[in-house]
Image (cartoon, coloured by chain):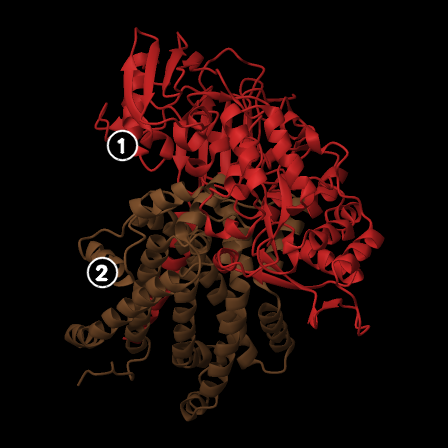
Chain colours: A brown, B red
Amino acid sequence: MVSDVGAFIAKRLPWAVLTIFLASLLSFSLLYFSPGNSAEMILSAEMGHEPTQEAVQSFVKNFGLDEHFISQYLGWMSNILHGSFGSSLRTGDPVLEEFMARFPATFILALSALSFALIIGVSFGVLSAVKPNSWLDYLGNVIASTGIAIPSFWLGLLLIFFFSIQLNILPSFGYGGLEHLILPTIALGSHQVARILRVTRESMLDVLGEDYIVFAYAKGLTEKVVVIKHAIRNALNPVVTQAGLDLGYLLGGTVIIEQVFGWPGIGSFLLTSVMARDFPVVSGFVLMIAFLFVLINLLVDLSYSIIDPRVKLEGVK
Amino acid sequence: MVEINRTFLSCIAIACVVAALALAGCTGEQKNQNSPEQQTLIVGGYRDFKGCSQVKANVFNTFLDIGDDGRPQPGKLVESWEISDDGKEYTFRLSQGVEFHDGTEWNSTTAKWFFEWCSNARSTNIVFQKIDDVETEGEYTVKISLNEQYGAFLKDLTSPWRSEVIPPTAVKPERSKQGEIVDFIGTGPFKVEEYVKGQKAVIVRVKEGEESKVDKIIFKTIEDSQSRVSALRAGDVDIIGATEHHASIPYESVPTLKEDSNIVVKRQSYGRVQTLEFNCVDGPAKDINVRKAVNYAINREDMVEKLLAGVAPPMPTILTPRYPFANSLEGKGYPYDPAKSKELLSEAGWEDTDNDGIREKNGEDLILDYVVPKGEANANSIAVFVQSELEEVGIKVNVQIMERGAAGKAEDEGNFDLYLHHMYGIPGLPEGPLTGIYWSENPDPGDKWKYHSEELDSIIETALSSGKDEDYAKAYGLLQEEHACVPLYDIEKIVAHKKEVKGFEFSPSIYRANFGTVYLEK
């Protein structure tokens, strides 16, 4: 088993490196070739008015922004290979420090939202499939439809209005105790709840129609045993795929929710950096997010064989 | 195997939930609960503490202070100064008895180290590139020689980005002129107790015994403007809007805040005007009659009433005439007069010959490209308003809302007739708009399309060398007469705080906020 996993990872590794490299090249070149002068944009955001040309030139020279694209990109890559992601043009602090200061907040929120989505989504998905056309099924449908239809930022504002301003029982923003996590988790996770609920329901309906389920019932097993022991496990693979994709997406930064709830994650910082053309930050963050995405995909693929032993790892004889 | 896998999956699921909850920690902060012994003020702001000059102004002093008129003045660190006749030597008499938070004394030795450190660490700032030599003359006098005359020298020494004064003990290696800042040590009334990047900073009052004022300030970063408003309404913060150099509270939220009996809203003008710059070099607006017609066609009173909840004062002059350096603009505001606007367009040869509502000249429609950099506050609705006002007099407006970089490129290349931006405010006045936009010597590529003339250049140069208000007033008077731009409204700074917050006063500079005088009513 261990050697299987090793072989699988060895086969995927070159593709993973290539994916990360292409993501970095793309983000660096998109930012480099898009209109706008980093120096002007950063200085004017800092000072609140247009900077003098002398100040702009001094900034450009200091950060080597007048160099050719290839030379800037190679310099950046060479620094990364030496363990340095460079420094932010806006804050002057190392990019890695900026990322590490913000990533825990994004990680916690992403994990919390995904856990919320899995608990609600899988529960209602299974119940909807087991009791089709029942009130539970209809309730599941309502949850899925509203979760998809309501924009998360709007839900966030509604939650703040009711729970923070009107009822005054939960904080409207910030990062700290559990009470700070509740509203952003619901706002962010509602979309994922809907998706996971639908995937679980579809998958469960497929599995419940399989011969071995009929056989299990024929054996005299109770519905509880059939569903929990035989059906759910076999229905989980698509759910895990969906959850893995969702987690990758959530770790990439949940810009709007972070903004609405003043959550100090990477998303809002990344957005501000894109606006300011702070390319060391954008390229560095994209590189790290790409790495995480690739890692999560790899873990999801590995988990298939753990959940369902019939699944063989691709490329392993 | 089945049991193991199920257990494994359950463990992972539980671990996910537990990790999320545990990592979130149990360090939740309660809303402001002040005891009679300690007064804590919770401030909500857009930026991180390190980039927020307004909060840092309570921890650090700048080398020189700034007056209500935007001019440099002696402050906590400097008592007085003299300038040599050639304008290249500045002798500063330093204040005595001032200490940094770590006990380091402020004297000529620390001042000399500070300027020499700035020449390395802040070398990208032009002011420090101009310094040739720093000498100490006794314990409390320091003489700075410049390599050439630099008119903005004193002004730059009031700037928080250039001259936040730190001691040699705040850098590592200590006292090194190449050292990196490793600690927040200043001479301000508060010192930093805690800083968490991107989240918060806690600053506490240095001197005890000022019981009637706040002892502790918790500055929290909340990037979204509506979220800051919600946080104030929910009672999670005590004050918002004070720590940004622009009007950070959305105007449309002001009526709601005013209706709340627990909230007080305050306004302060810094002379900063939301403006449309004309392309005076290429296109219809190079004709002064077209520029006049645009200025007379806009009902500014109506605009602020309908779109800005009546919060921002309409601005019919390029600067507010209440400043002595702009008093020439008194009574010169552009009136709302659509009939005159139409008359001027006809005089300029623009007539609607085909009755399609748009005027033409030589077979070409009168169309103005109106560029709006994305993210500029209130800009989109204002653009639509201006568009409809100009349509009334026969001018078609193409509103182009562009991402900031693209808008800057359009400006640089002259691909605009009207370009929206915000003018300089105190402390960038009076010289900012002149040297930064209208002086022909300004090398910014986007500004070459703006209004320029030899007469104006000569007045600006006289004003820059004399520094007299009447010379600046002359320059602004000419810009107003020439209809160099379309002033729209005064971007007033708005601060909202809880009713129990007392003693807040606006600072003379948009880059500062003084919380030293604030107290909480028990």
Q: Which residue has dot 1 on it?
A: B120
Q: Which residue has dot 2 on it?
A: A74
Q: Secondary structure at mark 1?
A: helix
Q: In the rendered image of this protein, does residue B388 appear above or below residue A311?
A: above
What type is the residue that disc 2 sits on? Leu
Image side of residue B456 versus residue A302, left or right: right
Q: Position of residue A120 (x, y in %)?
A: 52, 66
Name which residue lies at 49% across and 71% down.
Answer: A122
Q: Residues within 10 Å of mark 2 (few under 14, many from 20)?
A: few
Name which residue lies at 17% across and 74% down.
Answer: A10
Question: Closest to the observer: A89 or A141?
Answer: A89
Q: Chain of mark 1?
A: B
The quadrant the C terminus of chain A occupies is bottom left
Q: Which mark is residue B81?
A: none
Query: Quadrant of the rendered structure where residue B455 is?
Result: top right
Question: Closest to the observer: B38 or B356?
Answer: B356
